[in-house]
Image: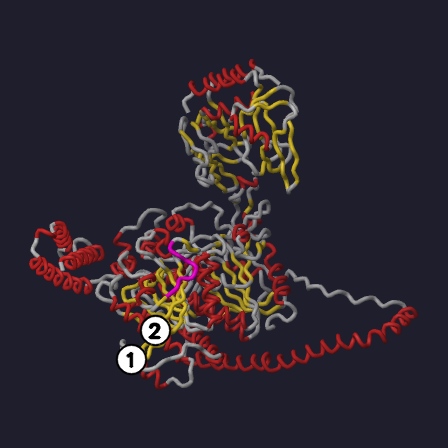
Amino acid sequence: MLIELHKELKDLIDLAKYIGEIKGEDFLEIGKIVEELQSLYLNFYDYKETDIEKLLQRYNEKLREWLKKAEETLTPYEIVKITRHPQRFTLIDILENVYDSYMELGGDGELNLDPAMICAKALLSRRVGDEVFFHQVMVIGHEKGHGEEFRRGGSATPWGNEKALRYMKMAETEGIPIHFFIFTPGAYPIEDPPGAAQQIAMNLYYMSKLEVPTVSFISEGGSGGAEAIGLTDIRLMAEKGYYSVISPEGAAAIEAKLKEGRPPREIVEKMAKNLKLTAKDNLELGTIDKIIPEPPLGARRKDYEFFKRLKYELIKATDEVVLQTRSLKMLRRYALSKQSTESFKYFVNWNLSEDEREILIENRYNKYRKMTQWALLESKGLLKSVTEKTSRFGQKIVYEMKYNILKKSQRTFLKFWEELVSESSLIIKPVSDPVKSVYNLIVGKKARPKVKTLTEIEEDTGLYVSPLALQDKTVTCPQSDKYGCPDLWVPDLYGEFCGVCPTCGYHFPLEYKWYLNNIFDKDSVNTFNDDLSSGNPLNFEGYAEKLRIARKETGLNSALLSFEAKLGGISLVAVMLVSDFRQGTVGVAEGEKFIRAIEFAKLTRRPFIALVHTTGGIRIHEGTMGVVQMPRCTMAVRDYVDSGGLYMVIFDNNSYAGPVASFLGAAPYKFALKSTRLGFAGPRVILETTGQAVPPDYHSVENALKRGHIQGIWDRRELRKKLFFALLTMGGPNLYYR
Amino acid sequence: MKINFQELTQLLQKFKANPYKTYPVVTPHTGYLVEFKVKEGDYVAGPTGEWLEKPGTPLFVLEREKNPKIIRSSHFGTVQNLRMDLLKKFVEAGETVLEIKHPLTQEEIISEILLSSLLVVRAPETARYILSQELVKKLEQKGMGRTKIKEGDELLIMTFMKRETPIYLKEPGEFILYQIYFKPFELVQAGSPLIGLCPIEDLPYLEKIIHRIKEEWSS
């Protein structure tokens, strides 16, 4: 009996300390209580058992009451602290308490390809009346570990994400659902192959058409690292979890324009509030589907009630995903909504037939396609919107007719004819050859037909003078110390040399209009969706003003330009991320414009090119609304590539973070101009996360090529020629649509 | 080959009289000297950092065609002979603007003495090099500074693209292996020093000199 009391006292101390750590030492009189409890613990055996029991009861009541009080005044930053607290439950606790049995695949503590990423096969039981059914599921998720240093707090390395992808494929082969658990402060930002950004992009690309039901549960969702295993049919989120584009500390460092050191506490707290990272906010924004309630101040390792609830919600969510693909679902869906946590009224088989898998993927596409659309601002009247809709519908019919119905039959016939001709030539040849040779002898040999060559592209792009060239002065090439480059006269540099140092090939940055005017045919660039812009969905302090200034300075409504253009007569659809508008960061409007452009390219059967003038990542002022553009756009890319389109990305200047880790990185063909810097996180973030400085050329394009992140390095002076050549070579004779 | 004691003593005396090396800083091209960023006697630093990524101290600004260029220090030391008379004047290319007086360290003097006194075997080709197996065995037994080598001994193996060529000692007499300048299997440029050998009879004298340098110069 005394032992139990001793244990209870220890738990109480833990709880009091926990409250103190979350709410701060000056919350009520928590510091005093901790001291009192600790002195009680030291002099435990001096008291009588009955006294202790009474004391403990009093303390218990008091602490429970305070817990409730603490819950009432919880701020977003305190929620972040709860999520990161070592006493919080982790994936291992879930595997132990939610699943009936599990087996970790490829890992035993530290002996693991990546201890921060755990993959396991698990059994989940469902009680229906007196019967118990077992479901087999694949569990993939981050493990923070309770103070285990080697797990790096749940930051998955690139090869950890690759491992996750491998087990996703395994689950797909076996046809079992996957439960993802996201407990990550962010991906481990190193470029070692396969590369942080590239692997996240690969994961997203693959997950968008994963043919099994997927459910994810977010406790700590840090941007790209969370997305790497977060593109799922249903996204659940813990009530005291956070899901954000960047950690509040990171946002504060950017906001305070710090180069190094820690940002002040007040700014961090303000950022946590501004970023709208709590579960409630995310539900309102529509980036998650459901909140799993937690006890006051969050569930800890021993909150078994919470695990019971989580188990029920996981089964229910998987049921929901499966039932959405079934034709006979009305009754069961109704029953689902009425269900109790104790037992289920029926059994749902989680295996999907082939038709159901198709519906599953379609449902997933529609779900993400609709996400965040409410935040778009489109300035147009009723008439304009009606005419646009009709014209879009008309276009659809025309192109469907042209390509799907007419072209298909035509192509089948052509293929048949080709076969016929080459087959028959074998029969006719022995007969016709002697005749031919006699004929040649008499008449004289006919000249052989010329071998077809790829057409040369004309240099007709119109006259464009970069405004940068209008200065009479010289500049020094930054690499002149190394290569001894002479100074460059600005009108030459930005005119004839296309902003490239003729000695060493260093590329000076150029404005985005240069590309529009020098790559594509004269007067062929035709932008669309220009009026699409994003508002301020999070009501982020000061963001509206920043947007207004950017709009005024650039005359653009978003950082992404989408346009149709021609290159040597080849008609194509392209997008360009512009550095002038908030460093080419991606938010809701940019994501939507990208998807619309790629859908337009799919509809009109044209190649799709993404030019990256510069991208600084996901716009932090749009929070998770920006983050979900990663899965959204990657899905559109997958859809386009699968239907036969040619998607090519060309990087220039600086390309970092979210976009590279999703819709840009997922491209089958990626090229970069010289002097580009390409990567996931900048040197400062790498130093802070890994504790190791990286060499100055860590993100250089040469290293990116060495690591296999891109397919080639191009020179800006030859961009038009190279791009044309690439279109002809990669697209082949039947440019698009195999 | 024997060590030329006279030359060595002269070299030592030179170092003793003036334990500095001066690096003149010249203008890379013509232009107006707009501004000095240092004063006479200032301490300046060369490039630093693990990859020498942090540039040296700015010395002065040279402007040509509206392109102000900051000239930076590439050595450590103090500024001397600053030509204040050139300020705001047009300067020709190659004009010495200031000098950086670099105090020589103990290691720098020792390495210079060794390079001038030892018999240095240099790389005949750009390739990878390893010590010959016999020499490695000897080194393990005797240790550095005690391994004897005589004429005709196999010293090194040059390996390049799986093609291996042995290198023999051609000088007459007996030597001691005194210094190794390369790392095994590292690509060495042609002409770079590989190993330093000391004639066996001169060894006590050389050791004495080095001992003296170590005592007299604080590092």
Q: Nearer the viewer, residue A131 or A128?
A: A131
Residue A23 showing in the rendered view: no
Residue A125: give its label. 2
| Label 1 crowd (10 A; few <14 / some 14-19 / many >=20) | some
- Report the chain holding disc 1: A
Q: Is residue A19 above or below residue B179?
A: below
Q: Is residue A517 above or below residue A597?
A: above
Q: Quadrant of the N terminus of chain A?
A: bottom left
Residue B214 showing in the rendered view: yes
Amino acid type indicated by mark 2:
Ser
The local secondary structure at tag 1 comes to loop
| Label 2 crowd (10 A; few <14 / some 14-19 / many >=20) | some
Pointer 2 or 1: first along the chain: 2
Residues tagged 2 and 1 counted as in contact (Cβ below 8 A): no
The local secondary structure at tag 2 comes to strand
**Residue A668 picture location, percent across and down:** 54, 63
Residue A669: give its label. none
Instruction: Verify whether residue A107 appears in magenta.
Output: yes
Q: Nearer the viewer, residue A487 or A734?
A: A734
Q: Is residue B33 left or right of residue A727?
A: left
Amino acid type indicated by mark 1:
Gln
Query: Which residue is located at x 42 percent, y 49 percent?
Result: A683
Q: Are marks 2 and 1 on the same chain?
A: yes
Between circles 2 and 1, the one closer to the viewer is: 2
**Residue A657 picture location, percent across and down:** 43, 57
Characterize the magenta stretch by its predominant secondary structure: strand
**Residue A185 picture location, percent across and down:** 35, 57
Q: Nearer the viewer, residue B49 or A206?
A: A206
- Determine the image quadrant of residue A712: bottom right
Q: What span is in magenta? A: A102-109
Which residue in the structure is indicated by mark 1? Answer: A339
